Image (cartoon, coloured by chain):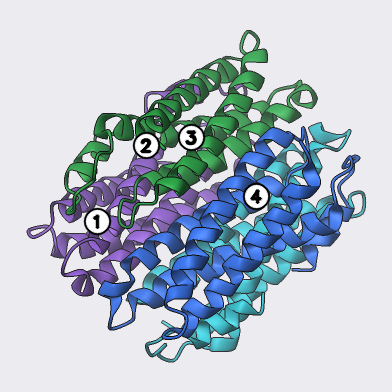
Chain colours: A purple, B cyan, C blue, D green
Amino acid sequence: MDTVKAMLDSYPKDLGDLDRARLVACIQACYECTQTCAACADACLSEDMVADLVKCVRTNLDCADICAATGSVLSRHTGYDANLTRAILEACIAACKACGDECERHASMHEHCRVCAESCRRCEQACRDLLDSIGQ
Amino acid sequence: MDTVKAMLDSYPKDLGDLDRARLVACIQACYECTQTCAACADACLSEDMVADLVKCVRTNLDCADICAATGSVLSRHTGYDANLTRAILEACIAACKACGDECERHASMHEHCRVCAESCRRCEQACRDLLDSIGQ
Amino acid sequence: MDTVKAMLDSYPKDLGDLDRARLVACIQACYECTQTCAACADACLSEDMVADLVKCVRTNLDCADICAATGSVLSRHTGYDANLTRAILEACIAACKACGDECERHASMHEHCRVCAESCRRCEQACRDLLDSIGQ
Amino acid sequence: MDTVKAMLDSYPKDLGDLDRARLVACIQACYECTQTCAACADACLSEDMVADLVKCVRTNLDCADICAATGSVLSRHTGYDANLTRAILEACIAACKACGDECERHASMHEHCRVCAESCRRCEQACRDLLDSIGQ
């Protein structure tokens, strides 16, 4: 998604002191994690042992929804509201942490959980990095 | 949306000590606010004075995305995670507060902002009521 | 969701010859169906016989996503594009038909599937009614 | 989003005769287009000439919502329904065509519209390629 940077660079107004590299990385991670979580939920549904994976499906779905909302909010800069950005980043960190932990439990048995866990960890870290740079 | 209660009542497992009335009210408020915010963003776009409403459009879009994610998360009970529920409720409260404040500034001039501000206030309160009942 | 009508009535520009009553009914049905499908997917996950319900979960998730997108598109009137409205209504009809059929198969065993099937049928019909009124 | 292919490769059941390369390309294009459209809507809002761009904002928002729903549907394979896949691809083609056309009109003045138009064209083509491979 090289277009994330191209879109940010073409934003017509000042972005203030936002860390552009961290913002680009975080947006990319949010969209990637939205997709891996949607795909992991569906892959879990097709496992023979789906009954053991229902919590994983649920956590995947939550994480997908919250990452998607976070990616959208971070893609907007007009009327920037640091308070709102921090709140949705905190929620995204909680969702990625929960989903990464749950997927990791199944990572040795299911490759889709392993890939998804890594995607959740990257997104969690990207959100933390961006949150750190926003300040209070 | 009377179906919200019907769906909750037909959930096959125990819901723990969640306050059902507050949960139903919060889910309904989240979906209502998703729609009013989407509609208010579009109505603002069609106002002659759209240039004065760009922050309102942006805040509407954020609030719509976050309310939609919150409504989805609250509609799921399998593998309930109080920590994640609290985090998304906090983000939804921040979004509804920001959007309610912004819409209120235009409420005397634009009926859609007045209706939307009220919808945001209801959703913010419903989220606070549910959050209070979840405990720590 | 009485606010759907209030938001439509406060739209500042002309709505052309759109059938307002059908539009309001369709928007309400789309948001209701988004929620029932999200809740039904999760209730299926918590059934002991989840392995028999994986197609139902998948169809629920598709229907929820498509109904949500349709509800958002229908909530916007600025720069109305009949061609796009028709295309998303056709997709929503297909999704609600597929999910209604699948949920109906389980309606006698699972109350959540029965409620969800009815919600899908209502949304499918509301989309057809609106589509009929748009013309070619 | 190299993870799209990794997730597809780890899907535990047979994918039938779906063209995997086209499916991966289409999922990636849908998520990319979701982001560029969200960002372009916001960039348009921050232009001094926002009043000339309100149709572009609206079309961007529709395209973002429909691409997001399409990307989610295409990320699921359990209980595959060719009829539903075709319907959402048709809607996505219509949305990307409308948004690509509208953004192209402003491409010489606004770099974000130029980048977004290209993203819409790629997504439209990826959807057509996948649709062609699905058959009737």
Marks 4/3: CA–CA distance: 17 Å
Assess disc 1: are there few (<14), some (14-19) or many (≥20) residues with their C-alpha within 10 Å of its C-alpha.
Answer: many
Q: Chain of mark 2?
A: D
Assess disc 2: are there few (<14), some (14-19) or many (≥20) residues with their C-alpha within 10 Å of its C-alpha.
Answer: many
Q: Left or right of D3: which side holds B107?
A: right
Disc 1 designates what residue?
Answer: A43
Q: Please identify the residue farthest to the top as the structure is shown.
A: D108
Disc 4 designates what residue?
Answer: C72
Q: Please, what secondary structure does the residue beneath circle 4 have?
A: helix
Give the label, 3 or 2, closer to the camera: 2
Q: Nearer the viewer, residue D76 or B100?
A: D76
Q: Chain of mark 3?
A: D
Q: Please, what secondary structure does the residue beneath circle 1 have?
A: helix
Q: What residue lies at 72% left-to-right and 48% top-to-bottom?
A: C131
Instruction: Tell me the kind of residue under disc 2.
Output: Ile
Q: Nearer the viewer, residue C132 or D48?
A: C132
Disc 3 designates what residue?
Answer: D35
Marks 2/4: CA–CA distance: 21 Å
Q: What residue lies at 32% left-to-right and 35% top-to-bottom?
A: D23
